[in-house]
Amino acid sequence: MPFTMGKKSTKSRSSRGSSRRSAKVAPIAMPLQPIKCCQRIAPKERLFLEAAERGDKHTMFRCLHPPSPVNVNCTNMLGRSAIQIAVDNENVEIVELLLKQNGVKIGDALLYAIREGVFKIVEMLIDHPSITPEMLGTEWYRSKYVGEIGDSEESNDYSPDISPVILAAHCNQFEILQLLLMRGAVIDRPHQLSCSCRKCQEKVTEDGLRHSLRRINTFRALASPAWISLTSSDPILTAFKLSWELEKLALRENEFKDAYLALSNQCKKCACDLLDQCRSSEEVIAVLNKGNDSDSDSDECDTNADGTMALSRLKLAIKYEQKQFVAHPSCQQLLTSIWYEGLPGWRKRNTISKFTICLGLCLIMPFMAIYYWTFPLSKIGKLLRTPFMKFLYHSASFVTFLVLLMWASTEISSLKDRENLRGPPPTTLEWLVCIWVTGFIWSECKQLWEEGLKAYIRQWWNWMDFIMLSLYLTTFTLRFVAYFQMESGKYGPRSMERKNWPLYDPTMVSEGLFAVANVFSFARIIFLFQADQYLGPLQISLGCMLIDIAKFMLIFFLVLTSFACGLNQLYWYYTPDSGNPPSFYTLENSYRTLYWSLFSLTQLKDIKINNSQYFTETVGELLFMVYHTMAVIVLINMLIAMMSNSFQEIENHADMEWKFSRSKLWMGYFDEGSTLPPPFNLIISPKSIGYFFRAIKNIFCSCCKKSSFQNIRRKRNKSTEDNIK
């Protein structure tokens, strides 16, 4: 790093200092001591300090030598010593002169040199005998406090926890940080926020704010790109984990939420900057396909059993929600090439050509499934295992399932003889729906087995699948229960008017659950919108709005409950002699009336009571008026504002959000397995039988090896005991 010797102009110094200070450093504190009076500084000391400011080496040399040498550690009215002034001016000759003096106290001069980024001066200061490797890191403040390298007073410019290595990381000084690391400087990682060790308890009790600021300054150093690059064998993995940890801390320490989120975004940007360094597809593959074992020094990439790329690092990025990294152009280019593998020139075709080809492939899906069962390793079989073909056939299977649902509903409505039939036998279409649902259940079980429970429940679409399939499974179970009940002849006649059916007849309950399941099924098709660049952002915005509605419903339920209880307490005394009871006579009616009144389905006459007191009616109308004011004017508009804000946030980062969502969708089809969609996946293929016997063979071989190893170990122990005897 270039440096300047001798005198420098004030203008050049200020310009360089301002450029260096533009980097993010630790906040400078207010002076802890009052400014010294000019009369307290001796004339010779003032001359000495002014010479240090001007870079007058000869004048300083005369002041430091007999007959009356000045104190080399004297300070001006701002509390700055000569060596600190020289370091701030980047005057190497003056610093070298002062370091040769006996008893010189470096103080914050080392921190100034690191802040200015003058490598030569930093090297000279840390080579001084008073500086030890421990003092460059955790022992910096302790050594200053006991007066080893400076005054026992706290620094005016830096908090006590800002050590040289932490400041170098804050300023992102790569060369200086590397020098400090070579000299043995370390940064102790903060304990967990919930840590209850004696050291943490003492710090919190002593000063809770200082303890929190110390944690933030330490994490700011750990999140520095310079620190991550120089200390981690896997910088991208380190950035992922640290970013995730900082986001969790932002949720737990709300007082410093903005600071933690800023550091988390800094780690995400660091990972993207590292990916920017890739200059070819091979380097991108090496980064995204690297294993997740940070302790391993091997550069080999992970691969699946069939030789395809495992993309372990990309899966980890999706797990830690590194949206910027996943949406990076290099990453998206690789994903796109894998997605359309086996279909050269697909992206160059027009929309009509793509639709025609997809329609033709969907029509021959049964024949392709039969061919895949017979020749799974053929060229066509490999084509069917590509991600795009699997997505196409799974989507076509689900659309076919929806068509069957619509057809089954139309057929049932046309059969009038089943209207009053309890426990009717299933129709052909209902059997087809049952087979499709069984295929979906088997597919979800395989996904749960491959991904694991934690990864499975982390995705909201899996929750929707679970609810949908549970409703269908319950529906089929109740239908079979109702059928066998009617066959036994112990539960009344089979044909009966619906108004005379039992309240919770299994057939009636199954029909209600089947209707709810159909709603979930048709809503599930929104999942496929993630593959489209126009519908994808809308689908993401819809998901965020549903979260806003869930938050809003909590507040709305409290308001609804308060008015429902108040109106019920007011009206329940007036029991009608005849006719319908008033709308607020029971708590259930109160909830129902207040809810439907939001949609203008309740009129003012509905809350009138015959033979009631004028005061009661007035109070009731007043409460009803206040409720509408709160619910319609305040709460509904608040919900609209919340949803608009969520939509705008997604719209501001629409491309990144959509690419991240699409990548999660694509990654579900990259792994080996689940080639055939439901219901074709229910038929056991010869390949699956081969995999089953291979797994049994591997288990048997591993058991044999373990048994032989135990026998050898037993014989070895026995021979050792015989030798001892």
Image: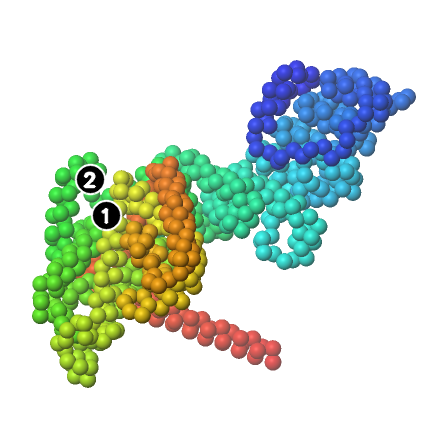
- Determine contact: label 2, label 1, CB under 8 Å: yes
Against 56, residue 413 (above or below) is below
Please tell me which residue is depicted at 32% across the width and 53% down the height of the picture. Answer: 604
Q: Name the amino acid, label 1.
A: Phe
State whether residue 128 appears in this view: no
Q: Name the amino acid, label 2.
A: Trp
Please tell me which residue is depicted at 32% across the width and 47% down the height of the picture. Answer: 542
Q: Quadrant of residue 471?
A: bottom left
Residue in front for this viewpoint, 191 or 346: 191
| Figure colour scheme | rainbow
Q: Which mark is residue 678?
A: none
Relative side of 720 to 375, left or right? right
Q: Position of residue 29 (x, y in %)?
A: 67, 34
Please tell me which residue is depicted at 15% across the width and 58% down the height of the picture. Answer: 406
The quarter of the image holding the N terminus is top right
Q: Which mark is residue 346?
A: 2
Q: Which mark is residue 388?
A: 1
The quarter of the image holding the C terminus is bottom right
Relative side of 676 to 187, left or right? left
Q: Position of residue 680 (x, y in %)?
A: 18, 61
State whether residue 709 appears in this view: yes
Q: Secondary structure at mark 2?
A: helix
The CA span between labels 2 and 1 is: 11 Å
Residue in front for this viewpoint, 308 or 567: 567
Please tell me which residue is depicted at 27% across the width and 39% down the height of the picture. Answer: 534
